[in-house]
Amino acid sequence: MAEPTIYEISSSGRTGFQFHKPDVPCAEIPAELKRDELPFPEVSEVDVIRHFTRLSQLNYAIDLGIYPLGSCTMKYNPRINEEMARLPGFAMTHPLQPLDTIQGNLALIYQLQEWLKEISGFAGVTLQPAAGAQGEFVGGLIMRAYHRSHNDLKRTKILVPDSAHGTNPATSSMSGFEVVNVPSDSRGNIDLEKLKAICDDCVAGLMLTNPNTLGLFEEHLQEVIDIIHQKGGLVYGDGANFNALLGVIKPGEVGFDIMHFNLHKTFSTPHGGGGPGSGPVAVSKKLVDFLPAPIVGIIEEGNDETPPLYGFITPETSIGRMKAFYGNFGILVRAFTYIAMHGATGLRKIAENAVLNANYLKMLLGNAYNIPYNRKCMHEFVAEGFWNDAPGIHALDVAKRMMDYGVHPPTNYFPLIVKEALMIEPTETESKQEIEHFAEILKTIAQEAHHSPDLLHTAPHHTPIGRLDEVKAAKDLVLCCWIPPEE
Amino acid sequence: MFTPHTDAERNAMLTALGLHSIEELFSDVPEKYRFPELKLPDGMSEMFAREYVEGFADANASTKEFVCFLGAGAYDHYIPAAVDSILRRGEFFTAYTPYQPEISQGTLQTIFEFQSLICNLTSLEVSNASHYDGATAAAEACITAYSYFHEKRKRIILSHSIHPQYREVIKTYLCGIDGIELVIADQDDHALSDPRNVSKFINDDTALVMVQYPDFFGRIYDFSDLIQEAHQHGALVCMIVNPIALGILKTPGQMGADIAVGEGQPLGIPLSFGGPYLGFIAARKELVRKLSGRLVGETVDENGKRGYVLTLTAREQHIRREKATSNICSNEGLLALAATVYMTLLGKTGMQQVSDLCYQNAHYAASKISELRGFQVLTSQPFYHEIVVQCPLPVDHINHHLLEEGILGGYALEKVYPEMKHCMLLAFTEKTNKEVIDVLCEVLKESNHG
């Protein structure tokens, strides 16, 4: 039996929450501005708690086990982060309070800006973007503004490797650029010769994910950056995979001009079933004045007795505002707590263990799966979810069968340059034993693919619901429900 | 701490990989840059980290100790205990985007119910799974309209009484699209001129007209005539709405609007210094294929059992790449959950109650404040739960005085509307009852004398 919708358990006249009566004289609402009946469900608090608790039990979550989605960095979300974000001193502050009543918030934002600069090797940071994709958008608009500030209007193109996440080309379009795809070479790097041939003085920049979505560190990183810079372009770093690089390399030092972070990946803030994220953007010195407004700065230096006074600063040639207020502050508190607990040594250990786990898992899979770009990987790797001698089996079947073994499948059908891709990122969260257990599951499924293919085709068998009809969903387009009419 | 590896396990794994040290895993990283020093404080234990982070929180004044009359886009409402109790369930907050529907029905059905509630609240037919915040939802609505007309209609008209930060965000979002002509109606007039004057700017090249309801100054208008006029020119109309107000007020759908967007923070989401919040977008069905962001649809599994999936994904960036109308790749899932729990818990009666309390308290306050010598309420009737008050002294001065009495005063409008000298925007919710409004009036009176 499926969980009914909250509308279906509605009972006319039932209430879940009681407000006090107004204690002021009654003011009439003009009749022409009154709404018609509000068709909301009527349920009790018990109904609500049971309904959502039951719904929660239909979810898989990192709290239940390995969640190896490639480039998503599903790591454990420390509980202390949750408590800190809920402190009334943070959670109950209004964004427009007078500066002297929010010095704690501003000091924390300032400190986090400084830490992210130090970790990434850049000169300036904005914490405003609400997600990685919005961070990319900031990057695209900064590239646009930078070239325009030099009256360089011919730069209409952004280069995007064919292994890139879909947000990169979408962001480039949104920022007013034309997208030019750059092919990969046989080792999974950017094809240098092709890059040289494509890159001219109409290129505004390159969006580079490093390590890329194959989990590989770009072997010609310096050359790639130099080719773009020599033609006057900028290099944007997509920080989706920054977990592999904590304390390993500072992208700003190698010559990246812009980079976004995903605090919900690298810095352990919860994914929340699809958000909220947070996508701070770091830039090199020449781009600091283009950052979105406002950023937090010191407006009056402190001394031994008094702390500095923090306030908001609008960069001189700012691209403008990306969202109301200052960013996903509650997420910033969580990331801040995480960094404070790790320090430099702890952060590097995260990258080390994440990379160790990925390489160990890749090795354990042995010959059970084909791994097309098989060299030392970083935090993730991509296997193929099909076998020539197991006709009719697809990556999707492997993924669905994994659910029967109680684990979450990896990202599938991405990156697009690998046929039937299974993109696996175990993160540092998993122990040696968990990795070994997971490898055993994958190997068993590879055997089943050959001997009992139907087990895969009809999977999953042990989930709350079977494979869903996506064609019907798109055709019928039922996007909301109502209270059922009374019989 | 959060990584389980013992030294012995690390060594065993390295040995299995034929490596002698962990550093060997990073040989692709250019040596010159490899393993830089990070100048960060030493890592802290949980106990000391808590103390350290609490120190920052303690340096703020919060609405826990202060009565809050600040609004201007973020509102201090009471959050029922049940909301956070559900939010803290690891099955919800530690799950990813529901790409594998068989093991994500909890998230998917919640979003489906969220979409339903938003449709009911706005009287529109479709809603997406949520957006970053109200301002970005408004910006995406502009792109939706532009794209709906295949980029053939160039003009987008914003009422000047839309939240100033929302207008700024829209401007940033549209700056990369050369074709769009962004018009801020009446921006040279006095800020409090009638927002329905946007009609003067509508022409046959107009893709979208956007107004706010209640507007930034708290005023409410029936926009039905304006919407009809826009439709006569073939343009779409988007209303930026406050969801609590829609508990009692005429809805965008009733007025004939094509799109409604808004900030969902008042629906059980903490102020949290401006984020994370919850943008929502609802629209008429015809616009569904141009809507940005995720959508959840109902379907069945192979046994005919009802279930939910992400649908119409072919609109989105991971499929359409550079041809997608938005690059958005997330929604505010956990906050959509908060709003869903909040709205279902309150239900029909509770939503009306809270909505009415805000209205009643604001009207009582307006009448009391207008009796004070030197203070004038500039917001005209009808209004909802915010009012503009002109003070006899600079707002910062008044607010300083209020703060000493435990009150967070209103937003100083002069910062963004220079002609509104000494004007503050005060907001009222169910938390600001008669007693605290009377105190506010007392202190305002004193501030004028003292």
Image (spheres, coloured by chain):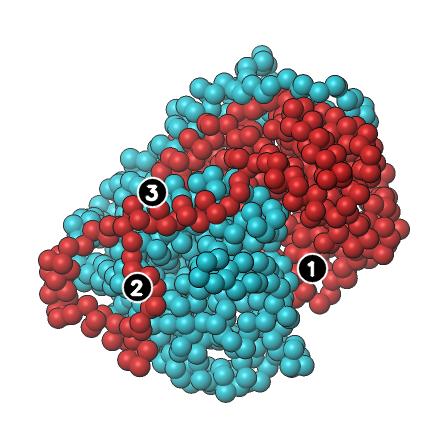
Circle 1 — which element?
helix
Question: Mark 2: which amino acid?
Answer: Ala
Q: Which mark is residue A344?
A: 2
Q: Colour of chain B?
A: red
Task: Pick the residue in front: A459 or A486.
Answer: A486
Question: Mark 1: which amino acid?
Answer: Lys
Q: Is residue A46 visible?
A: yes
Q: Chain of mark 2?
A: A
Residue under the image location 55 percent in, 74 percent down = A287
Q: Are marks 1 and 3 on the same chain?
A: no
Task: Pick the residue in front: B210 or A436.
Answer: B210
Mark 3 and mark 2 in contact? Answer it, CB < 8 Å.
Answer: no
Which quarter of the image is occupied by the C terminus of chain B?
top right
Residue under the image location 15 percent in, 55 percent down = B6
Which is more foreground, mark 3 or mark 2?
A: 2
x, y percent for residue B41: 33, 61
Q: Chain of mark 1?
A: B
x, y percent for residue A79: 33, 42
Q: CA distance from mark 1 to mark 3?
A: 39 Å
